[in-house]
Amino acid sequence: MDAMDHDSGELQEVSAAEIKSFFESAPPLKDGDEINKKLKEFVERNSSATAPRVVCVTSGGTTVPLEQQCVRFIDNFSSGHRGAASTEYFLKAGYSVIFLYRSGSCQPYCSSLPDDPLLECFDISDDSNIQVRQSHAEVVKRVISEHHAAVSGGYLLKLPFTTIFEYLQILRLVALSLSCLGPCAMFYLAAAVSDFYVPWETMTVHKIQSRSGPLDMRLAQAPKMLSVLRKEWAPVAFCISFKLETDSKILVEKADMALKKYDMHMVLANELSTRKEEVIVVSKSGKTVVRKDKAQPCVDVESPLIELVVDRHSTYIKHSGDGTETTRREEDEILVS
Ligand code: PMT
């Protein structure tokens, strides 16, 4: 849930000092140099294209550790399906994708595989070699070849995170490295990021002892990085945030508030129980409901959703070049087509 001022119904402002203090006190990334190197290579390769289009898709939930030597943590429901499926459709649309995902969550191209692919798709053949079971041969071949083509072709960079500390630090590295692409860069922030956390410096080092009795803990508000992303890290990039609620009555109102407050280009609003069937696209030009086509059960709601997002991004790039704003009329035309 968001930080709400209950009297005014406004989302609270996050101060620059809070953001600075979050990063200064966060445990440093173990592989920060390696991530930066990969990002540099990825951006260099992709920015040399004639019309580069790069999107950072964030996916899955962040954990909130309760101990520095972490035994216990708070987690959330996100499976990463939205981010993984969206990544596939972005790649299909010609984008290069930085897939910032929660370790162990859904992966692009893997939705048609069984739950435990290693055990279910493979067998040991007579000569002790491993072979794909005939029943899964076609799908395994397709998944591996599409995935390898995207990664080895340099169109897909996968960066894993687990904790909220890792997620926000990597997001900042990605944003700073994509800022050179200006309006051709996009952020599609589908990750379910913790709103509450235990600041590293106040966290106990060792396992919390159960003999101390019932646990009484105060969680601090995790700073939302949407404003700083828009204003400082990648001010010209096309930014899409998500809004998740369980109460349909407040969903669109909250999405509208986020659109204005964080100056997002689009907010994709969804309800927990219907998120795989329906997404409400909220932008300055109004609201559009994108639905999964019931006649085609194998086609995800992400298919029409990404089509719409790509259209809006194209219009944004076009108007960034001539310095004009996207007009309401043009956005309406995109919705109709
Ligand atoms: O992963 P699935 O199971 O497929 O589900 C998809 C989804 C429901 C997780 C996805 O569609 C979605 O709605 N993701 C955002 C969920 C969420 O955290 O909503 P929110 O209303 O709490 O946050 C709004 C936005 O602020 C999000 O874009 C989030 O990335 C961002 N945020 C949140 C907290 C925080 N501390 N910093 C942030 O930047």
Image (cartoon, rainbow, N blue to C red):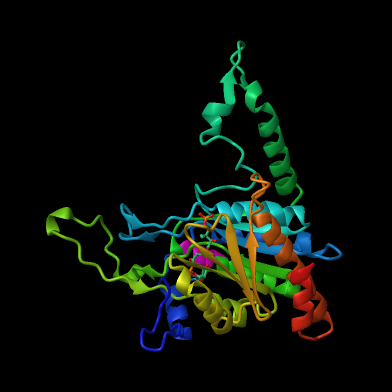
Specify whether residue 169 is painted magenta. Answer: yes
- Camera-side residue: 65 or 323? 323
Specify whether residue 22 is painted magenta. Answer: no
**Residue 121 % position (x, y):** 58, 27
**Residue 170 % position (x, y):** 55, 64
Quadrant of residue 326 within the rendered picture:
bottom right
- Asked if 209 appears above or below 270 in the picture, the reply is above
**Residue 12 % position (x, y):** 43, 84
Q: Is residue 41 visible?
A: no
In the image: residue 204, left or right of residue 277: left
Q: Residue furthest front?
A: 295
Quarter holding the N terminus?
bottom left
Q: Residue at x 79, y 67 (%)?
A: 337
- Most common secondary structure along the magenta stretch: helix
- Asked if 63 appears above or below 286 in the picture, the reply is above
Q: Is residue 22 visible?
A: yes
Quadrant of residue 285 within the rendered picture:
bottom right
- Asked if 53 appears above or below 333 in the picture, the reply is above
In the image: residue 109, left or right of residue 22: right
Q: Which residues are drawn in magenta?
A: 165-170
**Residue 2 % position (x, y):** 43, 74
- Camera-side residue: 42 or 106? 106
Q: Residue at x 36, y 84 (%)?
A: 6
Q: Residue furthest right?
A: 50
